[in-house]
Image: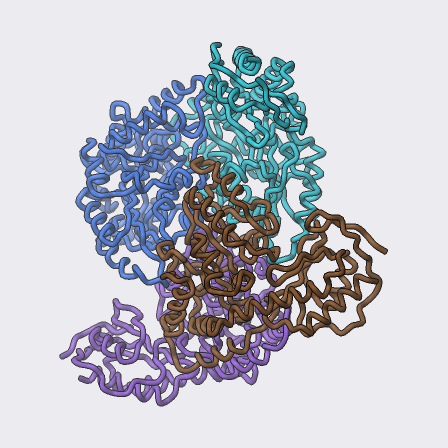
Chain colours: A cyan, B blue, C brown, D purple
């Protein structure tokens, strides 16, 4: 039996309808999220090494100071980095620091901060989110110009910050030129640009895996503030809010505490980041995750009905018939993504193994081909 | 040379004035804060053990489920526990869940949430804090009755929550009867009671070190919500907001995410708490810290000019002449506490050693007796 | 010269391009907004009558008490009415009273509270606004069902309130059955319904002009809270937030003051409302405004290029070529409404005269026919 | 029978205890509040005169433009004036405009914004209020220096605004030198000064009744923003937030709307203010009110048990035995003020007559002398 659905690109896909449980061995790790992965051994070792004696709380420790220097080195200029607990907290801190009277944040309607943060920006920052339709997860400069039309009219919230996600929520990666064009448009209107980099390492890996790659879509493109992710790339917990222009960080120190994102035993966040930065582990972790997504895509490339495009980073967005999806999820869990297009999400992590991919691909093949 | 200052109890103290650096070996660990200590080895081991394979994020994991059961056992009734990053975040979540239209929180003017949280409750909860003078760090039932006078008058913020700290910010411990009297007064006026238990283990240790001790000043006394501390008692990070009456937790699940306090890899918070609960490690850690404070007090008991009372838990509040204090802080750092009374704070931790105490006491003796 | 634009209904309109200033006498009153009108003489007289001697502030006066009774009579049941300064304030009070933890408000993307209130609901209520595409200014029950899909998922803001505008921002009027269907959908999902009635009198007039008409789309349809407009219908200032179910007003008394919407000399707001309610002046004012819009529509009915549909209440939304619009606006000001469809807004008021209509129509005819 | 109470100045007062209802004719107007008074006839006439034809809403009208010029003239320099509905709203707008990241407002513990605004500043501005003990209603420069000690420490809310009330909540009037000293201290620490001038006209009257008097404690003293009261001085409603340094008003335009304080038919607020400014009516109204308070004080000067000091402006704070107070309140209502000192408040208004004073004094005399 089959059924037809539009693919993400608009094409009609003929999707088989499932009938029965999958008998194969599931993968050891699911493809549900890079949040489901644990911590890299080097990260745990770094914590253990940092766990000797006392260190002053709240960042007055040598681990944090060393990390601050390394962020300067990473971005090739003096930046202001603030270590936080989690991505939602990091975004809230960044947006609060960039907020202006009557201000609003422009983002896509697929942005994590619009969809998945339970109105934290609205409640804590007191900002409006102006969510514009995404294009493959991306924002366009035209949207910014359009939103700028209300500037100066006090009856409307004033767009003061543009927030983009890199890697996007649809697994795509902005090119440096795309980010630069967004920054140019934003700055032309007096707005600032925030980059939610929960998966920034995967974007760096996708764009060549070098420091130049990192800088190409951040400092060089004109981004003002980055939420620099750690958790999804092999840390236990921890992200950094990095003000690429330190002048924008005035007040961030107080907001850091006020929005409840100031870790007391901060040395342990810093130690984890330091471990990731040693020998480019953060990039290698991301390269591995990306390559596992590519492997999964290749393993299923003949199943055109899935409508998967070759992944830019570490996720695929297959179109699945609900019964097939349910059967597969019961076997090895993953999340639905956009029910209006029947898209689900398969995501790899720093610890996904080729064997995991092989097993998962076999299960998918078994489910969709019946 | 000497100078005179009022002690915390009002008595005039004659305090010697210092002249010159301390030549002794400082303690390996400072007496600055239990926040300066690292993590207990058993905690790190538990994290390492939990770090195998994938687990769903945000608490859908077996470690968190097990911990939830253990909190029920701890309090002897079904409770609703929410794991959070840090104390400020836990307090904000608790107060937000208890907030009512036009509501205010009554606390002492020494309360951490009033003094040390950079207006997080005001900004995030949108509440007024009504700070009343503390009595040795404690709130009294009379204060509650007095504040209740504005109930029903819409021109005044409406006290809806009483927040007390156990162990208090002045190192004192509420007796179960004192907490019960506060709860009785609060409930009589339709208010709820929050207990900020950043150092709840030290209070349990001080009150006998049993589960009964824990229950005596929480569930049995009528407390509604507890912020149950982990960080200061040997965890890397992590606290729990425990609604002793689960009916009050309606909405807390959403607030948990909204106030940015929902850890993604929650299994690692749960694993740490589970390690602390194994074999009463949480109580033993606190008993040790308390005993080290007692040892420090005994070692300096003859220096009556310090004005230290025998510690109820793990901190002393000596009166020091500024020059002496500065000299000592330069040698082994600790914090000022109340400059109007010249009080400083010496705090022990789960990892303070008798040798640390011995060395620190020697340094103090050397500084104040010159 | 001509140009083509899509009309609001999708049809292509051929629009003439203007060339030169309008030589005719402009109307005494513009068609810019019912906000531009003054106060009805009876309203001023009522204020003068109330201006004798002292009256306790904040509603403890006989004028307010009388009005409260009249609101009960109006809705045919005991309601809880709160007098406020303005519409934005009234909406904020209503939404704050209906807010729940993690809550969100669902409205159309043309809703005044989403577009024209400078993020007041987000900042003051701390809520997310979920703006769904409007259908001729209206919300549909399907939207509510769709938004309800996230209920129970703590990563998403939880729709707890549906807010509709009657008369809508596009001059259309919900039928009682339409409102009832929305209320049914909302209540089925545990949500509440707020009706922004800045122009509620015009809706009542459009639906027959009786008390039954008022009740048909409010109490009878299941609406929970109404912002009952006065300013646009002949008052100097003042609106009422009417909780049709008084049980929902718990806390509203405190919020009333907290959101800065509690008038001190409240007797003067009450006196104005009392004047409007005398002899159905509020309905007669609205009927007049509506009839003037109909007259304007009829006067220009042959100019099909304007694309105006017969008005349900007191506004028309013509499609105008920008040069023509600019010329007309310079002559007698009105507002643009939706620049993506080239729509402008012509609005009548309680004091618009047939002569105003005649003159304005002549000017329009002169501008578009050249 | 008599009883003893401490007077506001600490002196013990012997207060007679009442026994029985007052038989005299009560005054036509109560001494409850200047909020209880109506509007001055000239104000109503100005509204009637402004009520001709249409005027664009939200301040785009000639009445508002004229008033803006007059505020410049009043303060002798270009200022930025924003018309608002009420005092709480004006204060919230001013404090929001001056807010900084992590900021706090320092005020006295008797400040209206701390005591009587139901946490509006906390909820809407997101600020902490740091309430310090008042000295006869006043703040002292020492308090500012003391609060400045936490500047730069991110664990504490950062005092960024000093808010004083003139006339104070205890009827006293800051001298120009006192305000200048406060401003000097505030500015030295990088803080701004807000003056809540709900009764600014009464202060001007008290200090000589000239424009120079107004400027002496505002622009000349260094105040940054003034809430300029109208309601209590003979308007129906309306206050102005005047930024004496217009550079501080950046963003205020958007906040004006966002905090729900932007009147749509603004011409009617402007017309009222214009009427008050004509021929110094605002000063004459205040002079009259002040003189009536003086008359009341003189009429009762021999009743030393009342403990009233000669009024600086338009209120007295008698010490009354509760039974006497209750009896008097039943006869002609007024408010309790500070129950810990048994103080009540008697307040005159622009429309209090000598006969009102005579009757009220007779009643008081009758009640306390029995």
Residue D300 % position (x, y): 28, 86
Rendered view: B198 above or below D171 = above
Vertical side of B34 occupied by A24: above or below = above
Q: Where does residue B146 sit, x and y in percent of width and height?
A: 25, 59
Let me know if residue B288 appears in the view: no
Q: Residue at x 41, y 27 (%)?
A: B60
The residue positioned farthest toward the right in the image shown: C1
From the viewer's perspective, tell me whether residue D289 is left or right of residue A95: left
In the visual, does D247 lie left or right of D330?
Answer: right
Residue A101 occupies which quadrant of the picture? bottom right
In screen coordinates, is D51 left or right of C334? left
Residue drawn where x is 40% and y is 74% of the image: C63
Above or below: residue C119 compared with residue A81 = below
Is residue C203 at least partly visible in the picture?
Answer: yes
Examine the rendered structure and indicate whether residue A322 appears above or below residue B78. Answer: above
The image quarter containing residue D9 is: bottom left
At which x and y percent is residue A179?
68, 36
Given residues B184 and B292, the one toward you in this image is B184
Residue at the far left in the pictured view? D1
- Along the line of sight, which residue is nearer the eye, C155 or B157? C155
Report the quarter where the C terminus of chain B lies. Answer: top left
Residue D154 on image: x %, y %: 45, 46
């Amino acid at each position: 039996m089959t059924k037809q659905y539009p693919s993400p690109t608009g094409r009609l896909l003929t999707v088989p309808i499932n009938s029965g449980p999958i008998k194969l061995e599931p993968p050891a790790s699911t493809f549900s999220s890079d949040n489901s992965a644990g911590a890299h051994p080097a990260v745990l070792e770094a914590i253990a090494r940092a766990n000797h004696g006392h260190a002053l709380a709240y960042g007055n420790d040598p681990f944090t100071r060393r990390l601050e220097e390394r962020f300067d080195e990473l971005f090739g200029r003096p930046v202001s980095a603030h270590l936080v607990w989690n991505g939602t907290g990091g975004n809230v801190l960044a947006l609060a620091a960039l907020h202006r009277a009557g201000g609003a944040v422009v983002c896509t309607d697929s942005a994590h901060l619009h969809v998945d943060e339970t109105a934290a920006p609205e409640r804590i920052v007191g900002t409006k989110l102006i969510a514009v339709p995404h294009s493959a997860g991306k924002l366009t400069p035209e949207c910014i110009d359009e939103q700028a039309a209300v500037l100066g009219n006090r009856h409307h919230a004033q767009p003061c910050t543009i927030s983009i996600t890199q890697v996007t929520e649809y697994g795509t990666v902005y090119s440096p030129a795309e980010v630069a064009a967004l920054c140019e448009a934003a700055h032309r209107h007096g707005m600032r640009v925030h980059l939610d980099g929960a998966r920034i390492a995967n974007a760096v890996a996708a764009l060549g895996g070098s420091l130049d790659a990192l800088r190409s879509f951040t400092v060089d493109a004109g981004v003002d503030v980055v939420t620099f992710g750690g958790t999804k790339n092999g840390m236990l917990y921890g992200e950094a809010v990095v003000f690429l222009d330190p002048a924008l960080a005035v007040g961030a120190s107080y907001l850091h505490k006020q929005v409840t994102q100031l870790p007391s035993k901060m040395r342990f966040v810093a130690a984890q980041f330091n471990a990731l930065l040693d020998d480019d582990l953060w990039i290698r972790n991301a390269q591995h995750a990306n390559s596992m997504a590519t492997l999964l895509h290749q393993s299923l490339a003949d199943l055109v009905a899935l409508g998967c495009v070759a992944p830019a980073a570490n996720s695929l967005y297959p179109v699945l018939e609900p019964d097939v999806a349910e059967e597969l999820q019961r076997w090895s869990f993953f999340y639905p993504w956009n029910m209006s297009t029947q898209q689900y999400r398969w995501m790899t992590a720093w610890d996904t193994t080729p064997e995991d991919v092989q097993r998962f691909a076999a299960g998918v093949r078994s489910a969709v081909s019946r």
